[in-house]
Amino acid sequence: MPFHPQIAPEIFALRPDFAALSIHAEHVRNGPSDTHSAEWLGNACRELDAAPWAEAHLASWRDAYRAFGAKPQRTPCSAEALRKRAQRDGSLPAINAVVDLYNALSVRYALPVGGEDVVTYAGSPRLIRASGNEPFETVSEGAPKVETAEQGEVVWCDARGVTCRRWNWRQGIRTRITEHSTEMWFVLERLDPMPIDALHEAGEQLIAGLRRICPDVRTTQLYLAEARQISA
């Protein structure tokens, strides 16, 4: 079944250079972290400075966060948070095979990468600026909690509520990929100066990793940019 994310015009008004690669994966057989996923995570930590655009790309994300009122020093984008953890600890936490794969690619490319369980979605995802009424299901001190997005905040959401706050800062608990997930959606998000070719390269690496985990996986790609939506 097609899964078509939508990006609201106000996002491109905020950052005309924003582009994303959407990858819908079906017939996935996920599993626990293993030697392959440990290798992906280890290699990513050793390649922290491999991308020449890495620091400038993360700086662009800080600017994007400030533009909608967030404080990136307190709530950094997902790629920067992972990078800081890798720098501090020399390693990244193992979650499950698929999450390890996209976390490794996020660090390697200094690129925010999100992974979601499609079965848990109410309709397709939308990237919008919040009205201030959208609920966000999370956990606080080990207990379920429902927060509300701030007015003007950039969020991914579906018909039920916010699935990721502050663009790509924190994912909600409802849509997380688990070892039992079989249909998944990934979004790779870039700003200038990261090359578009590098975005597509990261997408191909993600698909290659998914095929290593599950050779029978079926994937569909959609390139999302201002006035452009191209399927592959």
Image: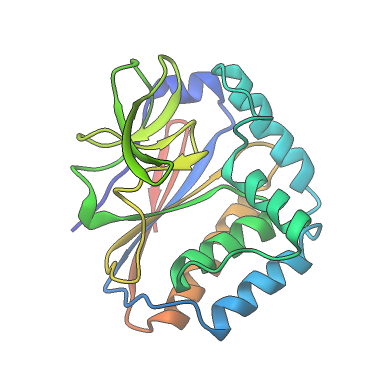
Residue drawn at point x = 26 percent, y = 33 percent: 161
Classify 12 as above or below 178: above
Which quadrant of the rendered structure holds the C terminus? bottom left
Q: Quadrant of residue 105?
A: bottom right
Between 214 and 72, the one nearer to me in the picture? 72
Q: How is the image coloured?
A: rainbow
Classify 165 as above or below 112: above
Classify 82 as above or below 154: below
Q: How many marks?
A: 0
Q: Position of residue 64 (x, y in %)?
A: 61, 26
* Residue 160 visible in rendering: yes
* Residue 201 visible in rendering: no
Which quadrant of the rendered structure holds the N terminus? bottom left
Q: Position of residue 80 (x, y in %)?
A: 67, 44
Classify 31 as above or below 169: below
Q: Quadrant of residue 69?
A: top right
Residue drawn at point x = 69 percent, y = 53 percent: 85
Residue drawn at point x = 62 percent, y = 49 percent: 111
Residue drawn at point x = 22 percent, y = 52 percent: 120
Tell me: 183 left or right of 18.
Answer: left
Q: Position of residue 147 (x, y in %)?
A: 35, 28
Q: Position of residue 87 (x, y in %)?
A: 77, 55
